[in-house]
């Protein structure tokens, strides 16, 4: 059997579109019948789905550069010839692509330049299957796709990389739901699940910057970013500073506009670099909140709360 | 990263792929309209009742845990609240079935203009430029007495 190393045999995302539609309708109907936990607000849903539709158009505009570069690297500079028909090659790319995704996702949260593209995915205050489709319009222009080039350099055919990226995206769709509480312990230990990903979408200070996994949660456990869902503190979804309306242009571009405004006020190269590549919320005088400062304040409040009964007892 | 399917380099193949992509796009747009319509029909948004003083204070405590708001001004329709915490105004307003929180200087807040029955608070944030809260004769803006809590 031979497979074209450049043109993928199928696109998992295109194939999954009917599944997206059917499962979203099913989640809404089950929510309506009170058979599953699901909240949908019509304008929020419209925003999420239009962002998804716009994302496919925006992705198409930059696809030529992304695909062309990947193919060029693979054709001219690959280290090994990795066959698409070998089972071990699929096992290897599964782990390698998922590890790449973890670091891409972590970068997308911890550095403002990439957060500006990714923030829209977190801008819904709902957590349902429609939220999964609230995808970026600017992912193709921020250069994050370069992170996948080492796989082509190693010798994985571009078609294989495209299929595995699609599989990862489709996997991450179904975990955007409140309808599933917890899965068997072994599954929760190894795979990204609705519970793990609810934590990732939470704006509660204690949950910020955690659970970056694509398919396997093991990377978060390995790199110290894993936080389990605590039933005593349900996730509150959205952004630390939520958007003021449902305008999809604001959803897509607000953080880029914020960066632009900050750069206009920058007074030194240090400030330019900080505003572009610092953590989201970075400011020269530290007057704005970052995930780290919000977590520190939360920890201080928790410590104060814990100390209260001891103080009362001592008095 | 999805290279086109068959015949990538030939003109007829490219045209066939473009037509297929157009069908997928049109089909997706129709599906989006249908899903939004079903979501509207289902009426399963979270309950978001109008704020009263107690619920407003609870929500402010969640959003601004390090602030101690004293004076409270509730929008006439219960869809927003402005609370004074020292020199800051803590603002909370409803969006759909959710809430949006911001702060601005109290001095700036009390100077905010009232137009069309709404006080328009400029938030200086591209993510939420303005909070427009409903004003009535019972609870005019700015609050009439800075020293006393005013709630509609």
Image (tube, coloured by chain):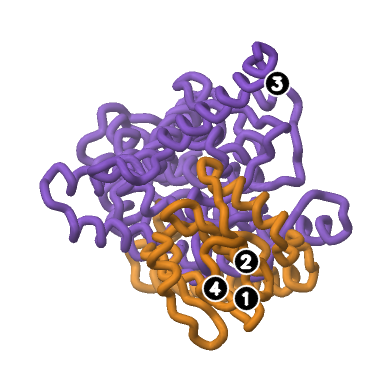
Q: Secondary structure at mark 4?
A: loop
Q: Which residue is mark 3?
A: A186
Q: Earlier in the sequence, mark 1 or mark 4?
A: 1
Q: Secondary structure at mark 3?
A: helix
Relative depth, front residue between A308 and A209: A308
Q: State which chain disc 1 sits on.
A: B
Q: Are marks 4 and 2 on the same chain?
A: yes
Q: Which residue is mark 4?
A: B144
- Locate the C terminus of chain B by quadrant: bottom right
Q: Secondary structure at mark 2?
A: loop
Q: Which residue is mark 2?
A: B150
Q: Earlier in the sequence, mark 4 or mark 2?
A: 4
Marks 3 and 1, Cα distance to the nearest angstrom?
57 Å
**Residue depicted at 50% across the width and 37% down the height:** A208
Confirm or deny contact between disc 1 and disc 2 (CB under 8 A). yes
* Closer to the eye: label 1 or 4: 4
Confirm or deny contact between disc 4 and disc 2 (CB under 8 A). yes
**Residue depicted at 62% across the width and 66% down the height:** B150
Q: Is residue B62 left or right of residue A72?
A: right
Q: Which residue is mark 1?
A: B139
| Chain in orange (letter) | B
Q: State which chain disc 4 sits on.
A: B
Q: State which chain disc 2 sits on.
A: B
């Amino acid at each position: 059997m031979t497979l074209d190393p450049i043109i993928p045999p199928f696109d998992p995302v295109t194939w999954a579109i009917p599944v997206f539609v059917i499962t979203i309708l099913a989640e809404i109907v089950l929510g309506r019948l009170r058979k599953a936990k699901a909240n949908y607000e019509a304008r929020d849903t419209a925003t999420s789905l239009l962002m998804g539709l716009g994302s496919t158009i925006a992705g198409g505009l930059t696809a030529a550069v992304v695909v062309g570069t990947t193919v060029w690297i693979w054709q001219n500079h690959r280290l090994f010839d990795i066959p698409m028909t070998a089972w071990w090659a699929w096992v290897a790319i599964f782990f390698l692509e998922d590890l790449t995704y973890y670091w891409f996702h972590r970068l997308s949260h911890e550095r403002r330049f990439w957060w500006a593209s990714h923030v829209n995915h977190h801008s819904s205050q709902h957590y349902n299957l429609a939220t999964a489709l609230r995808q970026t319009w600017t992912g193709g222009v921020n250069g994050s796709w370069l992170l996948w080039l080492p796989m082509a350099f190693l010798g994985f055919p571009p078609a294989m990389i495209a299929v595995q990226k699609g599989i990862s995206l489709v996997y991450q769709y179904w975990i955007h739901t409140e309808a599933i509480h917890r899965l068997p312990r072994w599954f929760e230990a190894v795979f990204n699940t609705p519970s793990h990903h609810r934590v990732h979408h939470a704006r509660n200070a204690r949950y910020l910057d955690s659970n970056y996994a694509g398919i396997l949660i093991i990377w978060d456990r390995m790199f110290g970013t894993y936080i389990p869902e605590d039933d005593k503190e349900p996730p509150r979804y959205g952004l630390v500073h939520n958007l003021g309306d449902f305008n999809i242009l604001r959803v897509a571009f607000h953080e880029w506009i914020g960066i632009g405004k900050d750069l206009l006020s920058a007074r030194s190269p240090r400030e330019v670099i900080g505003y572009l590549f610092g953590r989201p919320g970075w400011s020269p005088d530290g007057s704005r909140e970052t995930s780290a400062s919000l977590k520190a304040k939360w920890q201080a409040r928790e410590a104060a709360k814990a100390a209260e009964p001891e103080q009362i007892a001592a008095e | 990263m999805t290279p086109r399917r068959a015949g990538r380099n030939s003109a007829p193949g490219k045209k066939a792929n473009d037509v297929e992509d157009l069908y997928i796009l049109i089909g997706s747009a129709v599906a989006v309209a249908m899903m939004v319509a079903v979501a509207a029909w289902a009426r399963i948004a979270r309950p978001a009742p109008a704020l009263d003083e107690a619920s407003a204070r609870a929500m402010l405590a969640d959003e601004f845990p390090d602030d101690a708001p004293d004076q409270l001004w509730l929008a006439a329709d219960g869809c927003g609240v402005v609370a004074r915490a020292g020199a800051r105004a803590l603002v909370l307003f409803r969006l759909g079935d959710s809430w949006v929180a911001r702060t601005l200087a109290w001095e700036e807040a009390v100077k905010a203009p009232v137009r069309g029955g709404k006080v328009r608070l400029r938030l200086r944030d591209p993510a939420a430029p303005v909070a427009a809260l409903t004003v009535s004769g019972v609870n005019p803006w700015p609050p009439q007495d800075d020293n006393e809590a005013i709630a509609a």
